[in-house]
Each structure stands twice: as structure tokens, then as C-alpha cells.
């Protein structure tokens, strides 16, 4: 059983997990770089929605939190999304959803006029009711007490692209290999800003890239964008796994850094394990990262984070 400085029991990590989540601007996801995502542009007239799917082993969680069976039987847990806008400073929360054993969905809808900059989202499991609380119980007694949480931050302004992309003819520019479709350059300085640390270079001299650049939002371009996205994500996650992870975690606390982007990207595709555990799995089986990213991006029923 996990205990924290909160002063009451909390459930073990394996009793609650995120299955999927997404953030949408006017019903278009901004968590992907698919064809629709390129047109997902936030404005103060937009509607921003988000959902989290979480799986809860409710009986086990209650058993771990409440030692006294009377309070365990009467306690009610819920899920809620808290939000905060970095530009306006406004914040709030969704309506709590009562948890059941298994899969639960909690959602949120916000008016774009109160947002801007980065949108910070935190999904939490909280105590909704506990009429049977006793002095002997080591579980929470105050309504709203937080038992578990998972956070994500998304950029609303400029949401379609997290780092610069340029297109030029590799052969004419003397850029090797001349027949490559693209190349991703990543700065080794984890503390550098993402806008200058990563650059995606597209080879406009390659016939397939030229076709894409002529109509990037065309319906026929979805598969190309999926391949581009998958390759970019794999390269960045593998880059992260080969860095000093202690330094990456330290630098990721600074907003807008390469380290923060790498950590967030890892958490999107590997939401329920630490980056240290991912590295161990990668070292044991280098194909693990590529296979996991492909399974997410090329899943026809894909929902971000699933």
C-alpha cells in the first residue's frame, strides 16, 4: 500500500491507470500531427474539449485506502479534470464523475475566450463521499481529498507544430543523403528551447515529399503523415532514452525546453511507466519503442495515449 505525506492512505499505482486522453479544438485533436491536426487552430472563439479514460480496480483501491470495512463500503470515489491557462491565469474543474470498477471517462469543455498559451490539465481521483469514516480509519475524510493524479500540458497557441519544419531540395543544397525523404536534427542541449532545439527538414526534391507539400491536408496524405509522425516520435523518444535521464528530468521542469517536450512525448506514448523503465525495456529489446509507437499511430481506432 502506498503512503504519502498527504496524511492518509492512497491506492497503489497499479490500481489506477490512464488508457487514453485527447485535447480537441473545435472537435479536431491537437495531440497529433495528422491531416486534421494541421488545421486545428485555437482562437478566442474556439471550443476546447478534453477527455481522459482511466481504468480503476475500484474494490482493490478502496481496500488499500480504507482499512475499516464500514467506511470502505460507504466511501464513493470520483474523477475530475482540473485545468489552468498559462496566459489568462484562470483555472477551474470539470464536474466530478462517480467511479465504477473498470473503465471510466471524464470530460471537460471550455470556452476559448478564457484560455491561451499553455493549457494545464490534471485528471484526479478524489473522495466524493465517506459517511462511514471512523477515527480508526487511515483513509481520507475530507470531501475532495486527492488519491491519485496524472497531468499533461498542451500548447494552444501554435498547437499544430511544436518545432520548426523546413523544406528544401537536399541534392541542390548539397545535403546528404540526397534521396532521403526527411531528416530530424536534435540539439544535444536539453535545456535549450524546443523552438530552436529541434528542426524537421523535408526533402522537397523527393517525389513523395513534393506530392505531400503540394497538398499537405489532402485525404491521400494521411498515411504519409502517419509515417512521418511515427518516425519523428521514435527518433525523439530514442534520443531521450540515450540522454542522462536525471538531467532530462531536472531540465524538464523548465517550461518550453527540449527536455520538457521529450518527457511529454514519452508520457503520451508510454503513459503508465516511468522513462527509466522504458529505457530498461528499450535496452533489452530495441524494437520495443518503434513497435509501441507504431501500434498507437497506425491503430485505425486510435485515441491519443491508447
Image (cartoon, helix red, strand yellow):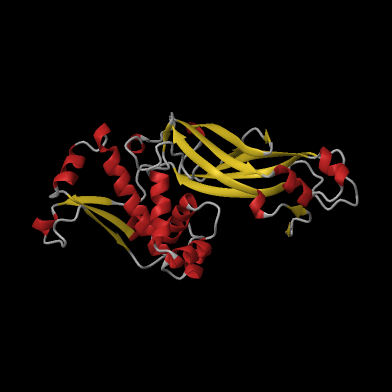
Question: Which quadrant holds residue 35?
Answer: top left
Q: Position of residue 261 (x, y in %)?
A: 43, 55
Q: Work out which quarter of the rendered image holds the N terminus and state it.
A: bottom right
Q: Kindly tell me whether residue 218 is visible in this rendering.
A: no
Residue at 41%, 40% in the rendered image: 30
Residue at 29%, 48% in the rendered image: 228
Q: Is residue 22 above or below residue 255?
A: above
Q: Kindly tell me whether residue 122 is visible in this rendering.
A: yes
Decide if residue 179 is on the left or right side of residue 220.
left
Task: Tally the numbered discs.
Answer: 0
* Foreground of the two, 134 or 227: 227
Decide if residue 156 is on the left or right side of residue 231.
right
* Foreground of the two, 257 or 266: 266
| Residue that lies at the very extreme toward the left in this rendered image | 172
Question: Which quadrant holds residue 102?
Answer: top right
Q: Position of residue 56 (x, y in %)?
A: 65, 43
* Foreground of the two, 223 or 163: 223
Q: Position of residue 148 (x, y in %)?
A: 66, 49
Residue at 52%, 42% in the rendered image: 20
Question: Which quadrant holds residue 142?
Answer: top right
* Foreground of the two, 299 or 152: 299
Residue at 43%, 52% in the rendered image: 292
Q: Is residue 158 above or below residue 201?
A: above
Q: Position of residue 34 (x, y in %)?
A: 34, 40
Decide if residue 144 is on the left or right side of residue 296.
right
Decide if residue 207 is on the left or right side of residue 247.
left
Amino acid at each position: 500500500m502506498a503512503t504519502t505525506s498527504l496524511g492518509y492512505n492512497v491506492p497503489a499505482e497499479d490500481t489506477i491507470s490512464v488508457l487514453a486522453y485527447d485535447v480537441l479544438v473545435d472537435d479536431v485533436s491537437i495531440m497529433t500531427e495528422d491531416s486534421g491536426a494541421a488545421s486545428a487552430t485555437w482562437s478566442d472563439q474556439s471550443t476546447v474539449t478534453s477527455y481522459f479514460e482511466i481504468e480503476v480496480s475500484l474494490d482493490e483501491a478502496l481496500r488499500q485506502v480504507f482499512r475499516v470495512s464500514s467506511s470502505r463500503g460507504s466511501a464513493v470515489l470520483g474523477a475530475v479534470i482540473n485545468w489552468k491557462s498559462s496566459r489568462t491565469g484562470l483555472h477551474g474543474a470539470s464536474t466530478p464523475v462517480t467511479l465504477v470498477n473498470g473503465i471510466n471517462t471524464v470530460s471537460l469543455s471550455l470556452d476559448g475566450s478564457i484560455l491561451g498559451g499553455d493549457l494545464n490539465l490534471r485528471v484526479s481521483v478524489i473522495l466524493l463521499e465517506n459517511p462511514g469514516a471512523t477515527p480508526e480509519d487511515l483513509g481520507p475524510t475530507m470531501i475532495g481529498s486527492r488519491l491519485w493524479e496524472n497531468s499533461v500540458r498542451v500548447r494552444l497557441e501554435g498547437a499544430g507544430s511544436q518545432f520548426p519544419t523546413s523544406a528544401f531540395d537536399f541534392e541542390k543544397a548539397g545535403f546528404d543523403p540526397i534521396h532521403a525523404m526527411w531528416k530530424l536534427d536534435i540539439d544535444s542541449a536539453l535545456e535549450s528551447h524546443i523552438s530552436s532545439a529541434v528542426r524537421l527538414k523535408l526533402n522537397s526534391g523527393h517525389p513523395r515529399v513534393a506530392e505531400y507539400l503540394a497538398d499537405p491536408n489532402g485525404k491521400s496524405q494521411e498515411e504519409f503523415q502517419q509515417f512521418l509522425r511515427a518516425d519523428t516520435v521514435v527518433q525523439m523518444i530514442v534520443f531521450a532514452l540515450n540522454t542522462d535521464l536525471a538531467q532530462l528530468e531536472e531540465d524538464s521542469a523548465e517550461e518550453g525546453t527540449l527536455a520538457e517536450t521529450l518527457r511529454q512525448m514519452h508520457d503520451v506514448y508510454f503513459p503508465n511507466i516511468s522513462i527509466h523503465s522504458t529505457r530498461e525495456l528499450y535496452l533489452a529489446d530495441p524494437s520495443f519503442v518503434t513497435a509501441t509507437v507504431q501500434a498507437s499511430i497506425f491503430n485505425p481506432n486510435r485515441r491519443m495515449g491508447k
